[in-house]
Image (tube, coloured by chain):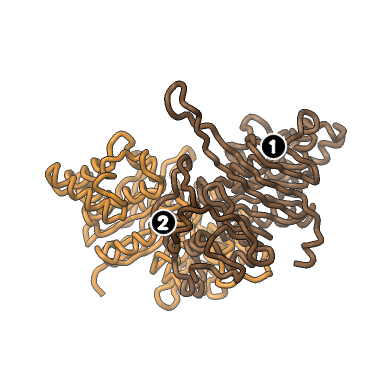
Amino acid sequence: MTAPLLKVENLRIELTTRDGVAPVIDDLSFELGAGESISFVGESGCGKSMTALGIMGLLPDKIGRIASGSIAFEGEELSTASEKRLREIRGNDISMIFQEPMTSLNPVYTVGEQIAEVLRAHQGLSKSAAWASAVELLDAVRIPNAQRRVSDYPFQMSGGQRQRVMIAIALACEPKILIADEPTTALDVTVQAQIFDLLNDLKRQTGTAIIMITHDMGAVAEMAQRMIVMYAGRNAEQGPVDQIIDRPRHPYTKGLISCVPHIMATLTDERHELTEVAGIVPSLREFGKNQCLFASRCAMVTQECLDNRPPEIEFEAGQKSACWHAGTV
Amino acid sequence: MSDTAQKDVLLNVENLTVRFAVKKGGLFGQPKYLYAVDDISFEIKRGETLAIVGESGSGKTTAALAVARLVNAYKGRVDLDGTDFLTLEDEDLRQARAKMQFIFQDPYSSLNPRVRAEKIVREPLDNLDAVPEAERQGIVDKLFEAVGLHPEQQRLFPHQFSGGQRQRIGIARALSTQPELIICDEPVSALDVAVQAQILNLLRKLQADFGLTYLFISHDLGVVQHMCDSIAVMYMGKVVEYADRLSLFNNPLHPYTVALLSAVPSVDKKRRADTKRILIPGDPPDPLALPEGCRFANRCPVAQDRCKTQQPSLKTVATGHKVACHLVDETAVSPLR
């Protein structure tokens, strides 16, 4: 196996809060190969977006910092890289699309100018060449009549079209990694399906690796090959998507899958009570304790879970679960 | 089905239309109207749940608001337990509102931040004055227990609760007047997935315990499938398909419904293998310049000439299954099959 495109090892990101320093990411390790797609899953407040911001070097200034561990992109260490170098990498090699396509576009520039800006900044294209590429990119993300729409302002586009513009901006420099942070949460299902199709097609054409952050297991099943389930800043479980959905080895993963009413192939008259995961994600104050942080919501909890942080237990095909009872879930 | 046929109809909505005036043209220009809900009819039997599903802009929330008279209907009837709710005035209306309560989408903005939880739940009782004051605290206590909140939490303010707990307060408030119908407008879409399950289970439990009837507005077909007995699918202000739960999900007929269902990502490997995703390109038409034919025609993969010129009416094609499409006849086979 060749060296992975992105290798994150024992990453720890700390946030300074009023109550002291809290590890929002606690000992996270994963790898991403070229052209691969992985998904981060979990509830809000579990550190999914923080991981993405950490990789991009976009942690909130003075509040968040990478405390230890490494993020290696093609062998190059990012956690200690200079701001100047990070700026070269961002947009060029790693780019990101955000959840809210309305607030992440600048309302006073046309979408064409915003796409061209990336190309001029990173690839030094001339104004006219960048504009021509912007039209091509809009066409590539399947916005009809790209020639004319390129001069539109964001408010003239629908939510789905704005997200397409975001994708065009992110893909302008043909990055090796595209991080999509809940790219379709604000969109309707039919539009979501179109965006997923688009991302999958672009991935096939350009070989971009995709990291998708989501809370929707269905979306993971459609989009990703591997998934990482995050809970309270820690990696609860990771491995191949189909395998985890068939046989989750962590009670949290199991809860996430069965708490959502899924549409199945044939619907019958019976309706099961949905499995509840009682309670909510612990507050930042609880993060970092030497115990299983899921213990307070877990049905399988034993004394062991409260006394020590569970180690990662490995199963076949790289499936790993951080649970004392992983074997019996 | 024979069992449900005997149940009486609690809510009967006929030809409900809601329009909004949109300023267009100069100083003396005629106002233009946007028909957010255009001539829809549905009914809900006592103790059952009807879902209205659709994407943003389909008019589902406006329809719910119009039923509760939170926006004014332009035309139509809303018969609640035999009386037309839309024609009631003053005191009659105030009393009738007790029978119909609303649970809102956003548990953050729908609770007054300066009022303690107990007061929020108690307020409808105080306003309606139907229960003697001495009994009100007892009702609040029972409601807190019913929705799974602790008695000591009554003294807290909304910001001290999590999103799921706030939604529980909203539910307790809706229950306080002992309503017959509760309109749930996207009650779980602002909540985290694990918390959604808690609220959905609670809603179903309360329905069984108190014999409640729900009008359930949602865009999430998975949730709808779990919660509802019948479903109305809306597109651009019109009901395009209306059927009981099993017929709609196992045999969707309208091309829009089929596309909508096929777009839902699934964890079920078999379903992913079976369903061919039907992409509907483009955008819905401009609501101020609606086409004269079927409103879905410009995006429909099987549209024919007559679809572009003639508006299809909602017609019954099988028992309990109505659809507004020229291409579906009594054989009840989807044109996309």
- Where, by quadrant of the figure, is residue A142 drawn? bottom left
The answer to whether B221 appears left or right of B321 in the picture is left
In depth, the one of B71 and A62 nearer the eye is: B71
The chain holding disc 2 is: A
In the rendered view, would you say A58 is above or below A311? above
In the rendered view, would you say A230 is above or below A88? below
Q: Residue B275: x and y, percent?
A: 48, 70
- Which type of secondary structure does the marked residue at label 2 adopt? strand
The answer to whether B309 appears left or right of A202 in the picture is right
Q: Residue B109: x and y, percent?
A: 58, 36
Q: Which residue is mark 1?
A: B117
Q: Amino acid at mark 2?
A: Ile
The structure residue drawn at horizontal position 85% and vertical position 35%, both measured from the top left corner, is B131
Q: Is residue A98 visible?
A: yes
Q: Which residue is mark 2?
A: A213
Neighbour class for label 1 at 10 Å: few (<14), some, many (≥20)? Answer: many
- Write down which chain is painted orange: A
Are the residues at dot 1 and dot 2 in contact (C-beta closer than 8 Å)?
Answer: no
Q: Which mark is residue A20?
A: none
In depth, the one of A202 and B22 nearer the eye is: B22
Disc 1 and disc 2 on one polypeptide chain: no
Q: Residue A144: x and y, percent?
A: 31, 52
The chain holding disc 1 is: B
The structure residue drawn at horizontal position 27% and vertical position 51%, both measured from the top left corner, is A138
Neighbour class for label 2 at 10 Å: few (<14), some, many (≥20)? Answer: many
Q: Amino acid at mark 1?
A: Ala
Farthest-out residue, bottom:
A316
User: How many angstroms separate mark 1 from mark 2 (CA)?
Assistant: 35 Å
- Which type of secondary structure does the marked residue at label 1 adopt? helix
Q: Residue A131: x and y, percent?
A: 18, 45
- Write down which chain is painted brown: B
Q: Quadrant of the N terminus of chain B?
A: bottom right
